[in-house]
Amino acid sequence: MKVMDISWLNDIIVWVGNFKYVGMFLAGVGFFMPSAAIALVLGAIEEESLLGLALVGGLGGVCGAALLYAVGYYFRNKDILKYIDGKKNLLGVSKKSYTKAYDHVVKNGLLYVFISRSLPFVREASSLIVGYLKYNVVFVFVATFVGTVGYLYVLEYIGLKIGLNVAAIMKTTSILNMSMLLILGVGILIATHFLRKKH
């Protein structure tokens, strides 16, 4: 039986132990950081500072979201509308359906941003999309902050309960990743179903 390489997790434990608040800030930012593992480890070693660490992670989440929002805003809808109106509309999206989708995301944007904070890669995409759609930046940052703090605090609490057990942290991280992929897959199926219904 092949033994799984967990040296990366041991490295995270050592690094996070030395740079607690910096580690949680980076976990909040995201961008391919192992956020779940960092929060679980910090929960296991920093029982007295769970809320403070989660708040720092929330600030990191806002910083990461601000960068992605700015990129999305740079490519805001005037560019896509020109593309949609053009002769080579490879997306097959009409101006009318784009406008409807825009209104829907603007209406439900806060909930979308809030929920997406617990889904790796989706959280980055959500910040790009709301920037692209010029969603109210204050609302986006509030939803990002609250969603990130809640997500990281729950992970820290789980880490507190399982302790600094490498096998348990690996198992929990795997379960979280599988759950998030399942949620994402179900979300895509539901969205596809509704899009087909509309056309």
Image (cartoon, grey):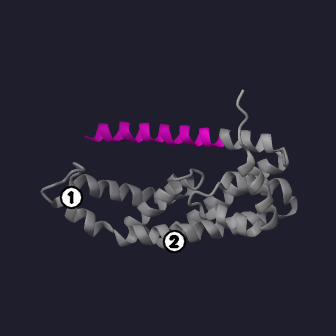
As drawn, the label of residue 84 is 1
Give the quarter of the image for residue 188: top left
| C-alpha distance separating marks 2 and 1 | 27 Å
Residue at the (37%, 36%) spot, across then down:
193
Amino acid type of the residue tagged 1 in the rendering:
Ile
Residue at the far right: name it.
Answer: 48
Is 75 left, or right, of 9 in this rendering? left
Q: Give the range drawn in magenta.
A: 176-199
Callout 1 environment at 10 Å: few (<14), some (14 to 19), or many (20+)? Answer: some
- Asked whether residue 127 appears in the rendered view, the answer is yes
Report the predominant secondary structure element of the magenta stretch. Answer: helix
Q: Does the magenta stretch include residue 196?
A: yes
Is 1 left, or right, of 88 in this rendering? right
As drawn, the label of residue 66 is 2
Residue at the far front: name it.
Answer: 2
Spot occupied by residue 104 in the image (x, y as percentages of width and height)? 38, 55
Label 2: state its secondary structure.
Answer: helix
In the depicted view, which residue is nearer to us: 144 or 181? 181
Q: Is residue 108 magenta?
A: no
Callout 2 environment at 10 Å: few (<14), some (14 to 19), or many (20+)? Answer: many
In the depicted view, which residue is nearer to us: 112 or 148? 148
- Asked whether residue 111 appears in the rendered view, the answer is no
Label 1: state its secondary structure.
Answer: helix
